[in-house]
Amino acid sequence: MTASVEYRSVQKISGPLIFVEGVSDVGFNEMVEVRDAEGGLRRGRVLEINRGVAAVEVFEGTTGLSTTSTSVRFLGKPLTIPLSTEMLGRVFNGLGEPIDGGPAPFTEEYRDVNGLPMNPYSRDYPTQFIQTGISAIDGMDTLVRGQKLPIFSGSGLPHNLLATQIARQATIVGEEVSFAVVFVAMGIKHDEAAFFKRSFEESGALKNSAIFLNLADDPPVERLVTPRSALTLAEYLAFEQDMHVLVILTDMTNYAEALREISAAREEVPSRKGYPGYMYSDFASIYERAGRIKGRKGSITQMPVLTMPNDDITHPIPDLTGYITEGQIVLDRDLHRRGIYPPINILPSLSRLMKDGIGKGKTREDHGPVASQLYSAYARAQELRSLSAIIGEEGLTEKDRAYLRFGDSFERKFLSQGIDENRSLETTLALAWEQLSLLPETELTRIPDRFVKMYYKRT
Amino acid sequence: MTKIGRITKISGPVVQAEGVAGLEMHELTMVGNEELIGEVVRVEGDLATIQVYEDTAGLKLGEPVKGSGMPLAVELGPGLLESIFDGIQRPLTVIRDATGDFVKRGVKATALPRDKKWHFVPLKKIGDYASPGSIIGKVQETPLLEHRILVPPNREGKIEFIFEEGEYKIEDCIAKLSRDGEIYELKMYHKWPVRKPRPYIERLEPSEPVITGQRIIDMFFPVAKGGAVSIPGGFGTGKTITSHQLAAWSDCEVIVYIGCGERGNEMTEVLINFPEWKDPRSGRPLMERTVLIANTSNMPVAAREASIYTGVTIAEYFRDMGYNVGVMADSTSRWAEALREISGRLEEMPAEEGYPSYLASRLGEFYERAGRVKSLSGLYGSVTLVGAVSPPGGDFSEPVTVHTKRFVRAFWALDSALASMRHYPAINWLTSYSEYTDYVEKWWNERTNGKWKELRLKALDILKKEDDLKEVIRLVGIESLPETEKLIMETARLLREGFLQQNAYDPVDTYSSPEKQFKLLSAILQFHEMALRAISKGVPVAKISSLPSVTDLAKVRMSIPNEKAEEIDRFLERIQNDIKRLTGEGV
């Protein structure tokens, strides 16, 4: 593969793309080496071949390339990255090369970063409860092993804080297993990346973590490869090394912007808001790499973070994500403004796999009904809040006022917690019952009577 | 026919080849050295454009392209049930055996098992004439379903030879037909092109409802056997759960469930649940009547486009045996997006939001494959299509939702406001509709003393009034309403919580028999009448609604199982006595 032809026939350069003429024996999606006038080496990938012309996206960007002094070699293989368990504790760029000053880790094998779709027939259904120590998540939007549960946030909201708290605290109660975190930064700022690194170091989690960094000033094409490199490592750790891997991807919005940028450079027909029509499939090729496989011990749990442009949940990025992921944790600016951390708005939040990860033998038998009751009571409280803003509290019945008290207390005592506060599920459920006990007993229509008898505290 | 062309262009799943003059539109082709499966989507001179159903990474210019002389077709015969196929009918079990837990490309797999023996019982004898599409024998494919062996719709002839009852493989020639001196060897299966609707004798008007066991659907927005329905909803509104519920509980003899561009774990969920869940009518595992087609969102996009046709063709085949078949396609938006992606790669002129201008006609063709027919075999069968739609941002004015509405006659609008209140199924009763109510009215009236229509209109009326009153309450508070209007709010609440909400995970509530549905609805409406009388005697609504029996009415859906539906009558008596006590008429 080293003996391949060197082409000096770059015909056109457009954004991150170069078009090479007169090529033969070139494969779709294969790796390319691009040498600039100074002899510097860049990498790229074949996006399209039409007759003798190959469109190549250059990971390091096209600045400094010219049609006359650039030479191109096609490597005849897809983009692969070297893999080994020694990658834990290290920091890499989007192509899996170490950038922490240390030597390249020992390589056990190379794999294509694009991965392969998991056969639905081979999948094992996720059912094991992961305790995050955060009441709003454990109690109401439970995370299970093998799930993909994103955080929908907005600019300026504490999603990074929450993501690191989850990475620090996530455990399976009563089980000692090998656990690893793969952290993927896409287009985030240097100081944010420093925050993540520091928080992993301080908590001692770094030795079990691999960090892939593509920062805001790194080339956008490499941003498209970064999550794929990281997930290739995650698959290796989970399905070859029997580890339970939590993958945090932040920020998917920057990833999508890079996707749009490349698509525009290719002059593709755009769909909504200029994003390419295949953004759904592209997202799926990342998110669907979470899961479990029958007969294998490890698992991949994904927690993508995205900032909703202008806090708009119907924007294509959160929208297409929500259609693929198994629920979403939505952060709310109003709660944040009122000083509530984590500012999780439970009403639009959802965990689709919760039902199979909770209940008798898994968490506690009353968990499901309690969560359901909290939802409906909080929804009612919110409704009454806006009503009382118009007609005043006097216009409300005594029962309605109980709901208002419930709503306030729920936010202050159940939702709110410290950034280092790691609550057990028992604590979370006790707090939940404490809030529910502010309502008249007859209002608990979603909870079977025997649980009400057991846990409801009459005042 | 074995002309070999060369690849000249590769763009994602779309490949162009030259030197292939004579390739037909929609012809199945083998692309590249690995012989990836593709389908011709455009022909210009000796240039052909092909959509490839497998990953094209590594494919090179100049690699060969071969036509097969056949359109993309499915195999129809015993072995369909209990299977899970990919978008072009390759069994995922076979793919796993070939390439492991991850799907690799280039797998050659026949759809139906070749080595399995089936117990064939002939229903015709030598000398009989076998007309196109007629039944010549049967195989008990699963305990739930007798698979009728059909003569292909394009074959006929005098039976020169037919096997006796016994164990045969599907490749065995079980009968020979002669016509005009030609002999046709009949096997237990035949192939049929997916893009060509299977013929029938005549189409009939729908007359019977599909009983789904889901109260809001059966009572308020029913679908008839042979009908077409759309379930649009933003993410998290429960499209998939609703589709799963329909696949599980509908009273169809066969279910084809198409997971089109959706989550891998959802298919796994069906694979785990359906062998365990029991059909409420026969007590047999639901899997025994189910065919699954899975093209998850990370599987090749062109196969997503094909998966819908693969599914509906299999459904038509069972229809032709005289069965009622339900097809759930989740989600048709992913199919439309696949169409858009391919169209973009073909550099076609886009219409709305990048979708090709032929989106509407493709949707129309698809939904027109639903219907109740007299099949070529002379038996009556139906295909009911239920298509989930995933509108971006939950906006129902987007092209897929809008065009779909033109071709379906029932519309179950999922509402994110209801979903965030955890009101499931989140079908909005004000914006949903069904044009099938008139067709199924007779069926229901025969079973409800003619009261079905009256009851559902009355309930819908109360719900509509609740919506109007909500506006008033928002301005002045509920306390300023007259008692009769407060009662409307109370009855509407009971309708919502005690009837419309249905818990898919509650073993009792997940399926409601028609009898229980009817009794429950009439109980709530009779409560309304009783309470109205009590109000006229000066009893305040607050007193009525806080009666324990009234509070419990909202839980009857979970506490009284289908087999004991008559207990609802006794429950109503309890309420009646309690209310009489309030008015002073009680004992």
Image (spheres, rainbow, N blue to C red):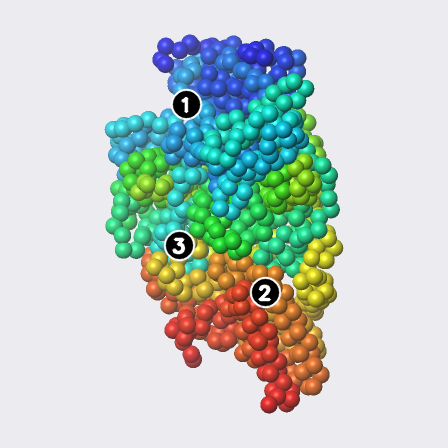
Alpha carbon of mark 3 to alpha carbon of mark 1: how far?
A: 38 Å
Label 2: few (<14), some or many (≥20) within 10 Å?
Answer: many
Residue A103 lies left or right of residue B86; in this view the side is left
Amino acid residing under circle 2: Lys
Q: Is residue B131 above or below residue A67?
A: below
Q: Nearer the viewer, residue A410 or B23?
A: B23
Task: State the residue at coordinates (65%, 37%).
Answer: B377
Dot placed on the residue nearer the N-terminal end, 3 or 1: 1
Amino acid residing under circle 1: Pro
Label 1: few (<14), some or many (≥20) within 10 Å?
Answer: many
Instruction: Give the structural element (helix, strand or loop) at label 1.
Output: strand
Instruction: Give the structural element (helix, strand or loop) at label 2.
Output: helix
Residue A426 image-quadrant placement: bottom left
Task: State the residue at coordinates (43%, 30%).
Answer: B115
Q: Nearer the viewer, residue B165 or A226?
A: B165
Residue A237 lies left or right of residue B165; in this view the side is left
Locate the N terminus of chain B and report the quarter of the image it occupies: top right
To which residue does mark 3 refer? Answer: A357
Q: Are the residues tagged 1 and 2 within 8 Å (C-beta)? A: no
Label 3: few (<14), some or many (≥20) within 10 Å?
Answer: many
To which residue does mark 2 refer? Answer: B516
Q: Are the residues tagged 2 and 3 within 8 Å (C-beta)? A: no
**Looking at the image, is mark 2 or mark 3 nearer the viewer?**
2
The circle drawn on residue A78 is 1
Q: Nearer the viewer, residue A136 or B293?
A: B293
Task: State the residue at coordinates (63%, 28%).
Answer: B127
Marks 3 and 1 share the same chain: yes
Instruction: Give the structural element (helix, strand or loop) at label 3.
Output: helix
Locate the C terminus of chain B and report the quarter of the image it occupies: bottom right
**Looking at the image, is mark 1 or mark 2 nearer the viewer?**
2
